[in-house]
Amino acid sequence: MKHVSLLIPLGDISLSNVEGTYHIFSEVNNALIRSGKQPFFEVQIVGIRRDSWVKNDLFSIHPSALTSEVNKTDIVIIPALHTDINKGIELNRELIPWIVDQYKAGAEIVSFCTGAFLLASTGLLKGRKCATHWYHINDFRKMFPDVNLVDDKVMTAEHGIYTSGAAYSYLNLLLYIIEKYTSRKIAIIVSKIFAIEIDRKSQAPFIMFKGQKEHEDEPIKKAQEFIETNFQDKITVDQLASMIALSRRNLERRFKKATANTIVEYIQRVKIEAAKMSLETGRKNINEVMYEVGYNDTKAFRTTFKRITGLSPIQYRNKYNHELIM
């Protein structure tokens, strides 16, 4: 049997992560019992103090054990933080050495969504892959540049450390862990009971590109704004360099540092975001949308679109177009 410590950090956290995890592991045990086997997961709610208030004091959670009372566990699960990230980390500083000690003692560590920020604060993610909510990827990269953030993945699993992407991606990570420790059959049963799409690998279709402007490099912001206003046209690096009076090399270096994208990548992402919005709301065919956002090569457009979103343009339109869905 695996002992699971479901952590309750202080501050506003994801209640669905806590209740959902407890419910799903309970159902795994029930499924095992029905098949004539012993339950496998013992889930304990663990916190810094006995009562934790979340959601502006609307709800409270009462851990059954304190971290100081849990000397050994097999799996530590960190739910998403819904409070200000820096505040959330500061509130939970005393959890950090406990998480590290448990990992060193052989426990596996799991973070859901923005719980990755607390996990990264332990130093355990240094040089390793990590997923988190796509909305927070720019902040994460600035805070933890030594972590290999994979912003399009639903989950990562590396050296006994697991992370999940945005919001309900945690369900897919739970299925992965269930399959690892029980069986594919049990994972499929649970996926059917909770209507979870099993084997989903990417959160790319859900990413909304907002542009990374949380920096102080004003010439780079000017270049970004020019790209976002004129993305239908052919824009060259030399053109941008001339416009903001920087050398090409200096522009490319500063642009990458400020936005975490090369200039070409940024232009592509702006174009594809515009194409996504058109495919979601309009009735234009794929070629019309392609020309509208400045592509003339069908293959290049489809290849770039699928690389960024994980879906072909047709698949994306069929999945998200409001009128087609209705």
Image: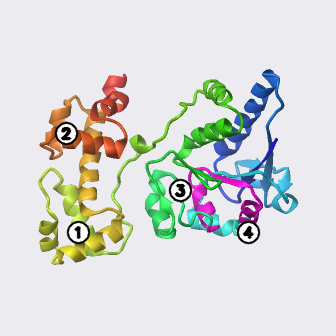
Q: In whole angstroms, how far apart are the C-alphas of marks 3 and 1?
A: 31 Å
Q: In whole angstroms, how far apart are the C-alphas of marks 2 and 3?
A: 31 Å
Which numbered marker is on residue 76? none
The structure residue drawn at horizontal position 48% and vertical position 69%, both measured from the top left corner, is: 145
The residue identified by callout 1 is: 222
The residue identified by callout 2 is: 299
The residue identified by callout 3 is: 130
Q: Nearer the viewer, mark 2 or mark 4?
A: 2
Find residue 91 and report its image quarter.
bottom right
The residue identified by callout 4 is: 97
Residue type, mark 4 in image: Pro
The structure residue drawn at horizontal position 70% and vertical position 66%, both measured from the top left corner, is: 96
Residue type, mark 1 in image: Lys
Find residue 195 and report its image quarter.
top right
The structure residue drawn at horizontal position 55% and vertical position 31%, both measured from the top left corner, is: 198
Upstream in the sequence, badge 3 or badge 1? 3
Q: Position of residue 58 (x, y in %)?
A: 70, 48
Q: Nearer the viewer, mark 1 or mark 2?
A: 2
Residue type, mark 3 in image: Cys
Q: Position of residue 117 (x, y in %)?
A: 58, 61
Q: In whole angstroms, how far apart are the C-alphas of marks 1 and 2?
A: 31 Å
Give the residues in magenta: 98-123
Q: In whole angstroms, how far apart are the C-alphas of marks 1 and 4?
A: 43 Å
Residue type, mark 2 in image: Lys
